[in-house]
Amino acid sequence: MVLKTFGWSFAVTALGLVAAVLYGGWTAFGVVAILSVLEISLSFDNAVVNAGILKKMNAFWQKIFLTVGILIAVFGMRLVFPVVIVAISAQLGPIEAVDLALTDKDKYQQLVTDAHPSIAAFGGMFLLMIFLDFVFEDRDIKWLGWLERPLAKLGKVDMLSVCIALIVLLISSITFGAHAHQHGGTHADKAETVLLSGIAGLITYMIVGGLSGYFEDKLEEEEEREHEAEEKAVREGKPKSAVKLAGKAAFFMFLYLEVLDASFSFDGVIGAFAITNDIVLMALGLGIGAMYVRSLTVYLVRQGTLDDYVYLEHGAHYAIGALAAILLVTIQYEINEIVTGLIGVVLIGASFWSSVRRNRAIAAAEGKAGSDEKTEVSSGV
């Protein structure tokens, strides 16, 4: 079952890592491995969300999403989007950007380094909004209760996440401007670039969130109509239909999934810029991660078990928060790529281990309750 579902992902992982060694030696291997782990860990909550929605759709639309949909949102976002970001920020044509990345790495590296403040501000704000909206929401399951309970209470204040994000952006741009001025003022104008790029990141997040919310509302309306139709059929004595969503409802669901997939892919792409500027290593690492999104989604839909590791989503979002902070810091200071990658891996690992411990504790409690019940029955006899 695992090999059948993950076979292609394992094959792509092996090929990608071999290609990394051939391209840039063991250092490149390390960067691609970290990128892959980061992307897979960030993709896990993507796969969980996808599977939760996908299981409601009929076989045709499931196939459409797992082929056409994955191709558009995952490969399009993860492999084409990094080139587009560099092309826009360095004011190059996309073909020129790719050509430069492959033929004149020093010049490409310089262009990316010059564009880094705007990329970091844009991505840092986008990721910060994902993180803030997650921690300010009141959830039934809490991983770090001592932190999440007070944050959930604060989250009742309207637009708090936007206000905090704008304050952080303002501080980042002022600090960067002051730092640039002290060092001769040659980059002082980039403080304005940081501010504008950060606002663009915030706007992008709000557009994606708005579209997702719109499609979600449409889906709920369609599901309500389907439910009413089913109830009417039962009242009229017709057999209850077990048909999964098709037609208009499934189409809206498909669109919603595409928007969600794009936003999840975006955090991986932006996170990758915090780890490496090398477009080839980025494509290899993110390509491996993209394959695991599909495999994980298929696996979760087939297994039907989405709630086994309840803290993983928390871990993924804390990793996103850490990446946001790192990106904003890298506007001004250099941070080692390995440190950046490992922070995410450690947070995901900790949330996974917490989930395993929680599952064991629940199983032990249920076992104890069962044995107590048996003891009572036997003593009663």
Image (spheres, grey):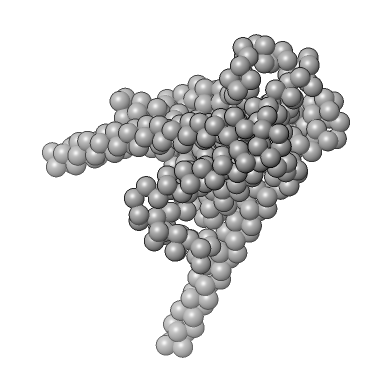
User: In terms of depth relative to the viewer, which is nearer, 211 or 240?
Assistant: 211
- The image quadrant of residue 231 is top left
Residue 18 visible here: no
Question: How far from the left and from the top, in percent, is residue 133?
Answer: 44, 48
Q: Up-down: is 272 above or below 76?
A: below
Q: Position of residue 107 (x, y in %)?
A: 76, 19
Above or below, comparing residue 190 to residue 366 in the picture: above
Number of marks: 0
Location of the N terminus (image quadrant): top right
Q: Nearer the viewer, residue 227 or 287?
A: 287
Residue under the point 70% across and 42% down = 333
Q: Nearer the viewer, residue 80 or 242?
A: 80
Who's the residue at 37% across and 47% down the image? 159
Percent across and percent down for residue 367 are 53, 72
Q: Give the left or right position of residue 62, taking residue 234 as reference.
A: right
Q: Is residue 184 left or right of residue 199?
A: right
- Where is residue 145 drawn, in percent x and y? 50, 65
Residue displayed at 79% across by 22% down = 106
Q: Quadrant of residue 246?
A: top left
Q: Quadrant of the C terminus?
A: bottom left
User: Which residue is at a point 52% across and 42% down the rendered structure image?
Assistant: 169
In-front residue for pair 282/327: 327
Say if 343 sits above or below 14 in the image. below
Residue 117 at least partly seen? yes
Q: Is residue 16 above or below residue 144?
A: above
